[in-house]
Image: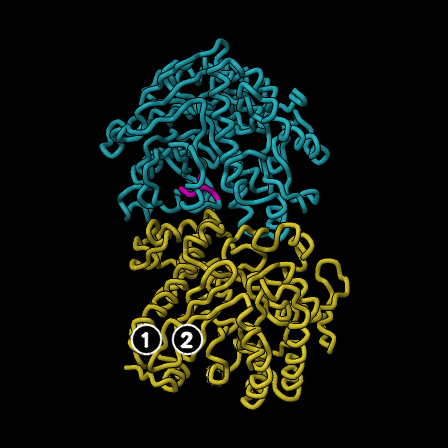
Amino acid sequence: MKLELSRVIQGGARLGVLQGIGRTGQHSLKVPGCLLYTHFGTVPHLTQDTLQTVNNLPSVTQVTLSNIAEHQEVLEEFKEGFKAFAGLHNTVLYCSLHDPATRSPTGYATNKTVSVWGSGGRIELTASKFMALLKTVKPDWYQSMADGETWQTNTSRKRIRKSVDRTLAYLDECLLVHQKSQDLDGVELFGVVEGGDVMEERVRSARETAKRPVAGFCLDGLQTGSVDQALRTQLITSMTTELPEDKPRLLQGVGRPDEVLACVEAGVDLFEGFFPFQVTERGCALCFNYDVSPDPECAVLELNEEKHSAGDNMQPKGDLNCEDQTQMTSFEMNLKDKRYQDDFKSLVEGCGCYCCKNHQRAYLHHLLVTNELLAGVLLMIHNMTHYQNFFGAVREALATDKMDLLKKRVHGETRNT
Amino acid sequence: MSLQKALSAASPLTLRIVAECPVTKARACDLTLPHCTVNTPVFMPVGTQGTLKGITVDQLESLGCQICLGNTYHLGMRPGPDLIVKAKGLHGFMNWKRNLLTDSGGFQMVSLVELSEVTEEGVNFKSPYDGKEILLSPEKSISIQNSLGSDIMMQLDDVVSSTVKGPRVEEAMHRSIRWLDRCIAANKNPDKQNLFAIIQGGLDAELRKACLKEMTQRDVSGFAIGGLSGGEEKNDFWRMVTLSTDHLPQEKPRYLMGVGYAVDLVVCVALGCDMFDCVFPTRTARFGSALVPWGSLQVKQKQYAKDFLPIDPDCHCPTCKRHSRAYLHALFKSDTAAMHHVTVHNIAYQLSLMRSVRQSIVEGRFPEFIRTFMKRMFPSRDDYPGWAVDALASVNVTLD
């Protein structure tokens, strides 16, 4: 795996391509970018047929041990690894610990173990069990074991220090097994940087992790709801200055477009793609504007009109510490709203996704009010497409010095430009 | 008679009998409707609320579905006929390019709505959404179905549970005939939308015959056999089916309502039915029950946790091509897409079963097909349901 950076913008934002990823090295992933979010290898609501209607799917698929751990015996018997088990062909598989769309309870990590929560409840993992699991999963990348329980505000310094120590100790244990295991030959391990909201701990965690032979870094404990963006930016900056330039940085648990932009500017390369799923689950469609093309006049008007007209049932902006991730953000429209009952426009005018090309808002509204399963399918297709295109716009903005314009667009300050 | 023929010729439906089984009453037809030609015998999946449970119209089309159902009761309530008109009919609303059949709404009225009362005028009920009193008359049903723009509309019939006996059955039969006349008169789009009559008469052969005699004199595009599949004895069921097809005209399609189990489909094709619908294959899929040539396979059962075969190794559906029983078993714990996988498989199963049935009729080997089908479906001859053996014997098919 090789990170080729074509631009590093002062302040931290990086534009480039992760080349030669996957065991056979035939894949690549543009950064900044996001991973394909799945439940047990399946993009929520979608079968392969419906998923394949989405263009430019991320080349890296994320699965979580929280989904997989309870099926370890099955995978052991299957032997061919998770990709073959899940019918995933032609993708890079990244295995992380927790599902970024749900909060894991705290108070369970010990010096020897971390816990994941599957459908059957809590499963406790020691480093050796963790590594045994990964040998059956056979991912291309994986996140090292980590104590990420410090995301709650008011976590004590002592607890934060302990989480950094533990996570480094876990990493050393994982590395020991990893380096001795033939099964994990060619598999890339991502070290996890912890440190809660304490700058010195962040720096220490980053510095120590960077000393280990890891392929990249997961920045943990900064998920939406844990810190506000100003602090998150500071903490990320403090870490990225400690991290080598040539290795990717994956930020866990952050997906809101405004937060993504700020984190990209602080030097983050990769995000988990769970945000479109959360939007889908609340019956909403992403509709924010990300157009930074040279002639925006005609393209943006429609989007902005929509946002403004839908304004009265939207969450106020800046409510970043909101604990409840089920709350709608200003980047989406609530299709359950009665106003869409007889609205025969596509979700987002000009969007090329399967949903927008084939269906109208009124139909989506109907599917939502009647609790029909197709609502989730169509919204997921649209939201994934919109989000992928947003990342495309981020890269374009970095390439053409338009990050300020993009931020304005995303924040919805472009009316009548 | 000549007038009736002229009217029929003008109807937006043509039926071409492609092949008739020399042994049974089965036939293979090409049923041409406004949106495309349907190859019969056909199973019609049910898309109750303008969507087929989690499946996109493109998926449905690529599975080879040529006609599916929408429910007038549900769609009439939400989103309502006015909105559907604005959306260019149900086809436009759900963006389905092929044929649609809509029911009359009467069945749901009786089965779903507790507070309903049947009078000569129609069915009175309280809306479960806003509590308003609503009258579903034959005129109202057709008016909604005209708004939906379905290729085949069903008459409003007076539905009585198939287990009810006595004068109520006779009353319902006569009323259904009167309502048929009102439906025919109410159809605003006879050039674009077909109307099917529904034969009633419960489990009483004389009432059925009387109903058949009356209804076959009306100018409708096709006939449905109604009032069955409601928990009656299978022995009664098949006798009513075969009696109905004996008296229905050859040149019009016969639709057996609410039938969708594989064995029932094969037997009732042999008894001369062309069209079938049932929620069963899609509903059961959501509970993890996959239809297979040997019955069904409960994917969620523990025994499939380590079973790395596809649901049916011989099936060519997208689910079976990619996923194992073990993966689906596990996925049921993680995501609703597991239901969609089984739904896709079950629709594929139903449609491919009917294609095989048709092929065997065309090739003149339907009786052999039935024998092979039954052998695969049941572990031994002793397990064959008696009613199916009798029904098949009545059309000259003896099982080995």
Is B191 rendered above or below residue B318? below
> Which amino acid is tagged 1?
Phe
Q: Is residue A102 visible?
A: no
Colour seen for chain A = cyan
In the rendered image, residue B365, in percent from the top left (x then y), is placed at 29, 75
Location of the C terminus of chain B (image quadrant): bottom left
Give the camera-side residue of A45 and B97: B97
Give the camera-side residue of A299 and B306: A299
Question: Residue placed farthest to the top in the image?
Answer: A10
> Which amino acid is tagged 2?
Val
Task: Quote the CA–CA distance across marks 1 and 2.
Answer: 10 Å
Location of the N terminus of chain B (image quadrant): bottom right
User: Which range is magenta?
Assistant: A38-44
> Which residue is identified by label 1?
B366
Q: Which chain is yellow?
A: B
Q: Do the residues indicated by labels 1 and 2 lie within the same chain of the protein?
A: yes
| N-term mark: 1 or 2 | 2
